[in-house]
Image (cartoon, coloured by chain):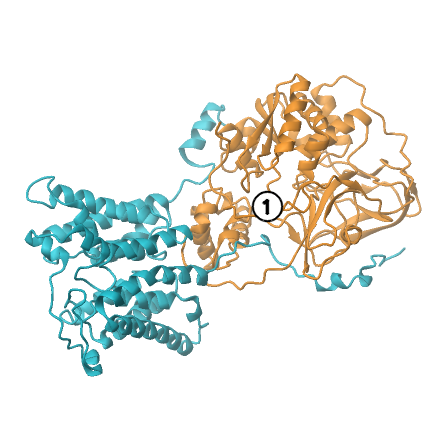
Amino acid sequence: MEKNHSKSGNRAWAARLKTGTPPHIRRNVSTQQIMLDVAIALVPACAGAVYYFGISALLLIVVSVLSAVLSEYLWQKIARQRVTVLDFSAVVTGILLALNVPATAPLWTVAVGSAFAILVVKQLFGGVGQNFINPALGGRAFLVLCWPALVSRFVAPGSMTITSVQSLLTGTVDAVSSATPLAQIAQGQAPSYLNLFTGNIAGSMGETSAMLILLGAFYMFYRGVIRMHIPLAYIGTVAVLSWVFGGNGFLTGDPIASILSGGLMLGAFFMATDYATTPATRAGQYIFGFGAGILTSVIRLWGDYPEGVCYSILIMNAVSPLIERLTLPRVYGTGKKAQTLEISMGGK
Amino acid sequence: MLKRTFTGGMPHEHGWDRKTQTRDSKPIPFSPKRVAVSMFQMIGAEDTPLVKVGDTVRLGQRIGEPAGPMGVPVHASVSGKVVAIEKRLMDNTSQALCVVIENDGQDLLDDSIRPFEGERTPEAIISVMREAGLVGMGGAMFPTHIKFRTGDKPVDYLLLNGAECEPFLTVDDQLMRNHPERVVEGAAAMMTACGAKQALICIEDNKPEAIRAIEAACAKSGQPISAMAMKTRYPQGGERQLIQAATGREVPAGKLPLDARVVVSNVGTAAALAEALETGMPLLRRAITVSGAVEKPQNVIAPLGTVVADLLEFCGGLTQAGNKVLLGGPMTGCALPSVDVPSLKGTTGITVLTADESEESACIRCGACVGACPAYLMPFRIDEAFINERMDVCASLKATECIHCGCCSYVCPAKRHLAERVFQARLKLRAMK
């Protein structure tokens, strides 16, 4: 009886076979690619920040990113975990944190804010995908809590003149503090739509130019990195509520000015779309956007803070796991649809 | 008119179906020097060999007797001499007894092969299904006679699965283009067997020639059989997705298509039935798509038991890039540790790939897997629960409904082995019941 009549010894390729579980092909996508796409989508807003607020904007962004990456690297080294800084998620957090502060913030504040965002909000809870709130917004909320004055001195574009490195480090700049559009709207004098759209207004570094943010948002949508459900639900809700309640009397509000002002655009497209802190279900995403919209409007209209985006998103982040649990999809073959079928089919 | 489809599934990038290599490759017959016909049955025990070493066998001769009423017989796929009866590796884990026959190249037909001439009653056709050794040729290899023994249960639709949604595979496409009348005849016989009121031959729209050919054959047949074009999307050929898209019905969890008054069968199985009725020839050869990183990708008609190594050699061997050989397609196929594995009744293709060795990284909760799952599961959450050994969470997330299509792993940017773990959760839960 022949035992080994296979002839596989003649075939060199038979020896180099690899195994593994199906599927054996993968889509050409990676975490790194996604994060890189977000970073690219932020380039217009960063460029705008430098254009409007000068070299200090660039320095703030660079310091913020370096602090985020270094914090993550050191943590992972010390904790003997796999170093994942090359997935660019820390880079994105660093950029977003910087864009959330005004250009007059001292350099050390973004360094501290980024470190907090990465170490406390992200790594302490399990690293990428495990953060319980948006890291950049968490960092910003921390800064506002600890040094409110230093991170709220908004200036108008073109008014930044840094005359010495020292002033950069201490943050004592000669620019004149200027009212943000939301503050102006509250006084009844809204800036022009054009200025609101292009960003020729006072505000934190990344929030001013709706135009540049939208550019980045469309890029991310085209690349499949974000879906428009949360941003549109969020912005739509704010638009409607500001129209209904935002003016002097019912239905006299200015929805366009409202959605172009403050941090809504930046928040809706770049922070309310963070994967880890928003529901993974379609229905849950609509609820998230809707809820954030209500909270933002309530804070803006009836709270003492001029802007409510940061806290709205943070609160919805906290509720997000619950929302997801309540909106679990109906599994194929279960639920009402299957039951009706069983009844009509004679019940088996 | 809006084409039928289901929700979820694989996103389609350019060239995703990888069928261009063999799309127009008409299957050519291959006669290996030796075959190892497996006694393996999907359900129940192996067949018992009816021959011994040294026996001469003829083409179509019964060489394996089923252990019970659920099993089907196995027939000699070549004529020649039995040189061994031994255990062989079947895939990456299991072994089965094989009757190894030295092919004399003559294809001498056994005397028992005779066309079916009786009245085509349901019982008679089901009997032919069993005697011809028919099993599901789409890959699952479920005994056809068992599936069609529907008893008193009403059947509204017979669906013939011509979707062939797996990338690379083109044998069903070729069958429908070259022998559409055989498929339709098989459908007619199957309708009689299960008492179906009508038959729909479901074909994905990336096979326009097949759709036209089947439509023409249906028109000629004068029976309530028609072609139905479906939107091309993996896994349209999954039984539950096919039923959902073609009829709008969902098979209730844990139940069979029959509970939705539907019977589903592969087009190849239907054609095999038609041939068994017309010529008496049992299932002993089939077309296989050999493609991917091989020198000469093509469709081959090979006798059952043709060893993968021989097929690969017939197709010029692997290219430099090829280092992973799959039985089946890339989404659900099994990676072989050895190429000395024989082909089975359900072997649809041999796909050679360059192994993707991306490392798994942390889940970023992007939800791509949720959008891709055709069973509407949340794979990333089942994955997490399974890793943390929370089978209760896996159960509440309905991991038992996973169809093992592989879409979740395919779309995952973190390259997580989601499909593997969700399916393992399913297996574990079913075993725990």
Give whichever of A243, A312 is nearer the camera.
A243
**Chain painted in cyan in the figure:** A
Q: Position of residue B301 (x, y in %)?
A: 77, 41
Relative to A236, is B139 on the left or the right? right
Left or right: residue A175 versus residue A101 is left
Q: Which chain shows up in orange?
A: B
| Secondary element at tag 1 | loop
Classify 10 Å Cα crowding around label 1: few (below 14), some (14-19), many (20 and above): some
Report which residue position mark 1 lands on: B17
Residue B85 on image: x %, y %: 85, 49
Q: Identify the residue shown where x is 12% and y is 44%.
A: A253
- Residue A163 versus residue B44: which sits nearer the camera? A163
Q: Percent position (x, y) of residue B433?
A: 52, 45
User: Residue B145 is drawn in which quadrant?
Assistant: top right
Q: Is residue A178 above or below residue A111?
A: above
The amino acid pointed to by label 1 is Asp
Q: Nearer the viewer, residue B385 or A320?
A: A320
For mark 1, name the chain: B
Q: Is residue B121 left or right of residue A22?
A: right
Task: Please indicate, yes or no, whether residue B265 appears anywhere in the rendered image.
Answer: no
Residue at image location 51% in from the left, 62% down from the top: B360
Q: Is residue A194 above or below residue A127?
A: above
Q: The N terminus of chain A is located in which quarter?
A: bottom right
Percent from the top left, x then y, of residue B169? 66, 44
Q: Is residue B139 visible?
A: yes
Closer-to-camera residue (A68/B117)? A68
The count of marks equals 1
